[in-house]
Amino acid sequence: MQEDEILKNMNKCSRCALCLQNCPIYQIKKDENNTARGLICKLLGYEKKNLTKKEIAKDLKICLNCSKCKENCPSKVNTTMIFAYKNAKFSPSKISQRIFLIVKLLPIKILYFLNIFKRTSKKNLIKSNVLYFKGCVVKAQHKTTYLDKIFSNANFLCCGIPYLIAGDIKNYKKAKKRNIELIKTASKVVFDCASCKKAVSEYEELNEAEKKKLAFFSDFLVDKKLKLKKNSKYVNKTVIFHKPCHMDKSDYKKIEMFLSSIKGISYKKQENSDLCCGFGGSYFVYHPLIALKIVLKKAASIKSAKADLILTACPSCTIGLRFGQIISFNFKKTLELRDFIENELVI
Ligand code: SF4
Ligand code: SF4
């Protein structure tokens, strides 16, 4: 995002405060400095040379970059990208951060490398220009998923958000450039991770028609009326879905319709399904106390739902939810929606 675009967005803020109530950090800290409205006021103060970088950088770092403020903003201020770019500018990636990012991504890269040697059947692959955006963690976990068999795997690079959050603009731009080239060749691009989809939909170089190509895989499932396998351990069990902060409301609605239509499970709509899981990539490492408070709040909400299975659609949320369940002694299974469909449904 260019500086003039950032400034234009910040000036759109009407100070209405509608972003406050859903901000996970505000709910914990009750400090306006850590809300979208507070951060925008401070950033505009910096533009007018009334504040220094130092006075803002600390507050920017506490932002989870969850996009809840953007989702609830009536003025459509792109808070997500303002905060990500300004954070990268004020706290550019230092050697220590780069090393941390390399260490963080290392297990993913090793697993991905090992996956290359696994045998895979390609006989069901339908060559098409509907491309599957397989995120880094999914690539590391699975050589193939059933989505590889339906769509073409175009080997997209990382969505880039871990680089942007770590202040590494160079690698963010590199990943973005490659992914945009692939999107231009596709008729549709299908995602199974809400955070990857959100990150790609924020590429400002994509025009509206290109952004419309981006779809969540649930779009293809709504009318399928799939059934649970007879021997599934979830027959007649209660299932809830955690809505990742980065998931669009329309994608969430389609997932709810799909889950309600599955024969053999009892899908229960959870009241606070969009409460943040608190994990947010490396957020736990830099702000453990705040993250822990958010995780515990989410874990209590999940426990009160008395579900047998928790589904979600973001690997980072899956880790956060599993961690929350362990520390709240709620040993119910948490699964990625894609894995649940592949292993438990007749497809
Ligand atoms: S909801 Fe949007 S317009 Fe309202 S204060 Fe927050 S950022 Fe500004
Ligand atoms: S991105 Fe999330 S944590 Fe950051 S200000 Fe917005 S709602 Fe709060």
Image (cartoon, rainbow, N blue to C red):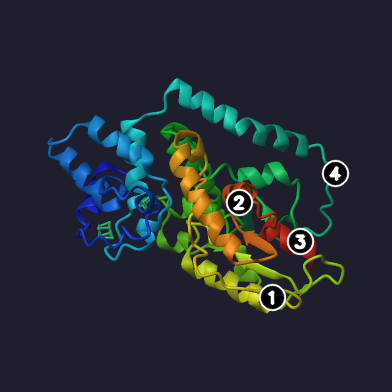
On whether ligand 2 comes within 8 Å of the CB at mark 4, the answer is no
Residue projecting furthest to the right = 231
The residue sitting at 77% across, 38% down in the picture is: 116
Which residue was labeled with disc 2?
328
Q: Specify the label residue 119 is tagged with.
A: 4
Q: Can the viewer see residue 222 in this picture?
A: no
Residue 176 pos. (x, y %): 48, 43
On whether ligand 2 comes within 8 Å of the CB at mark 1, the answer is no
The residue sitting at 58% across, 64% down in the picture is: 304
Going by the numbered disc 4, the residue's amino acid type is Arg
Indicate which disc, 2 or 1, sits on the residue closer to the N terminus.
Answer: 1
Which residue was labeled with disc 3?
342
Q: Is 259 positioned to the left or the right of 159 in the image?
A: right
- Inter-mark Cα distance, 2 to 1: 24 Å
Q: Is 244 positioned to the left or the right of 73 in the image?
A: right
Going by the numbered disc 2, the residue's amino acid type is Ser
Q: Can the viewer see residue 21 in this picture?
A: yes
Q: Secondary structure at mark 3?
A: helix
Indicate which disc, 2 or 4, sits on the residue closer to the N terminus.
Answer: 4
Label count reads: 4
Q: Specify the label residue 266 is tagged with.
A: 1
Residue 293 pos. (x, y %): 47, 47
Going by the numbered disc 3, the residue's amino acid type is Glu
Q: Specify the label residue 301 is tagged with.
A: none
Going by the numbered disc 1, the residue's amino acid type is Ser
Residue 20 pos. (x, y %): 31, 57
